[in-house]
Image (cartoon, grey):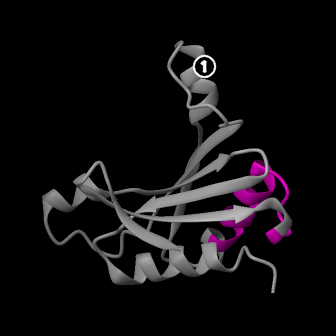
Amino acid sequence: MKQSLLQEKYPIFVAEIGKNETDYPTVEALVEYYKGKIAENPKVHFIGVFDHHAHTQRIGGEIAQGIQAAVDIIFCFGFAIPNPQMLAVRPRSIGIADMGEKFIISFMEAPMQPANQAMEAWTKALRKG
């Protein structure tokens, strides 16, 4: 996993995983994998899956060359609401882009270390032993 700044202001984590490096051959299989990981943790709540590719196509938006599918898995780690501003950084999402021979999985850094650790562990575990 790489950590970087997207557009010089959004701290994100990104993993590029070749389809030959994982047991999950499709976006749908990856979504089910993440839904299972979310369900295992009683403090995390699954919200839904947003098909960003279909939405962008439907509105005639631009899709970068090579992106065959793009979804966001939306969920919340909300252990507490320490102030009303915390709502601006929730819920969380993990993006999955199918690039043909590989997947690019990305998520924004969370303000809670346990959330970052879980999302990073879930993603790293996608690679075959």
| Residue under the point 51% across and 22% down | 62
Extreme-top residue of the structure: 60
| Residue under the point 13% across and 66% down | 83
Check the image and report above or below for 128 versus 3: below
| Residue under the point 85% across and 57% down | 25
**Does residue 91 appear left or right of residue 10 in this picture?**
right
Q: Which residue is mark 1?
A: 57
Does residue 22 show up?
no
State the residue in front, 92 or 12. Answer: 12
**x and y, in percent, of residue 32 in the image:** 75, 59
**Does residue 116 appear left or right of residue 9 in this picture?**
right
**Does residue 37 appear left or right of residue 23 in this picture?**
left
Extreme-bottom residue of the structure: 129
Q: Secondary structure at mark 1?
A: helix
Report the number of numbered marks. Answer: 1
Q: Is residue 33 magenta?
A: yes
**Does residue 1 appear left or right of residue 23 in this picture?**
left
**x and y, in percent, of residue 120 in the image:** 53, 77
Q: Amino acid at mark 1?
A: Gln
Magenta part of the protein: which range? Answer: 21-37
**x and y, in percent, of residue 106 in the image:** 51, 59
- Which quadrant is the C terminus positioned in? bottom right
Does residue 24 show up?
yes
Q: Quadrant of residue 122?
A: bottom right
